[in-house]
Amino acid sequence: MSDNSLRYIEIKRRLARHISDLGPHERLPSRTDLSKTYQVARTTIERAVSELIGEGLLYAKDGSGTYVSESTTERRTLGRDNRGIANWGLLVPDILHYIYPGIVRGVSDVASDHDVNLMICNTDNRFEKQTKHLHKLIDSEVQGVIIVPAINGIVDHEPFYRLQEAGIPFVFCHRSLDGIQAPRVISNNFHAGYLATKHLIRSGYTRIGYISRPPYSASADRFQGYSCALSEAGLAARSRWIAFESSFESDGEGYFSARRMLTEEERPDAIFCFNDGIAKGAYAAAAELGLRIGADVGIVSCDNTNICETLRPKLTSIAFPTYQAGKLAARILIEGGANAGGQPVVLQPELIRRDSVAVFDRSEAAGLLDGTDLTST
């Protein structure tokens, strides 16, 4: 689908939202005024209005203009049950996974405050399941969808075009999907990688590795943050100390990559792990090799899950405001999913210090320890 087609679909969706706020038989602004309002060619407005007339949302009077039809009032109730409660869909990779309950709770609290019924769908991070759930939600005539996009399988944009064509607003949460214009509330994964690596550097570590999940947007962004922090400090990012896992399966993640790095003649003295699960595997590899976490190898990870408190020593990790992300995404949906092509809402992570990083008095790191507050970097 071309950029022009995507733009037309977006304008039609925005027009549909606009007329849903008007009363029956209320006159639509002129084509010229609409063209100025939406910053598009008049031909784009003509096409969108013509199709909305064909769908029965508008009707034209010769020489008078275009008006909102009676059926628009009826369509406002679509997606509501017999008690008048609106229905939303919420797609998450796995509601039991330690990141997503915070998002679900944030969305659920806002939905409850606005008498919205929430239908939660697990995608298992797979595009084919995501597509299946979206088609069901569209057929159920929901009034909005919040989506944590899947990352595994063959990308399928078709259900998102269907959402746009149906005039159903949707919001991406936690991460976005390339090629689809929609409001989004995302986590700053670049800053997470930067914070974690900077903390290791300022603690005196100079040979820092990175172990990640397979390549996708979040793992790439955290890698860029890691690389930026090393570059600022004049430290090398050595390819043999960088590993992207071969699959998204959780069994044994982090262990084999960490063991390979830590058995090298010149091994890293610290590792930034993509998440706490990978860090747990790195802990196991270090213990097997007789290396002490903190003293012999420092470890920082992301997600700040309950794993951090169960490991010994306790794991330093980057926390993301998942509850806030869910609330903000839901509030955008309450407002009708406005500003689809605007700037994303980017939420900043926070470093949670524990015991997996020791502070050393190393001369080579002395120039890097400037006392700056990492959370404001």
Image (tube, rainbow, N blue to C red):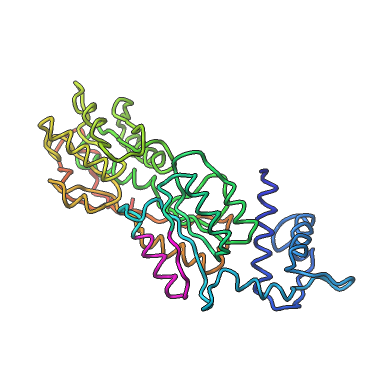
**91 relative to 160 in the view: left or right:** left
Residue at image position (37%, 52%) is 94
Q: Nearer the viewer, residue 100 or 314?
A: 100
Residue 340 placement, left or right of 262: right
In the figure, 196 relative to 60: above or below?
A: above
Residue 366 is inside the magenta segment: no
Looking at the image, the residue that sits furthest to the top is 265
- Count of number-bearing discs: 0
* Quarter of the rendering occupied by the N terminus: top right
Residue at the spot 48% in from the left edge and 49% down from the top edge: 130
Magenta range = 102-120
- 249 to the left or right of 73: left
Q: Quadrant of residue 109?
A: bottom left
Can you give x and y, in whole percent of width and height, for residue 274 in the image? Answer: 31, 41
**What is the residue that sits farthest to the right in this orientation?**
63
Residue sitting at x 24%, y 38%: 367
Tell whether position 117 is magenta. Answer: yes
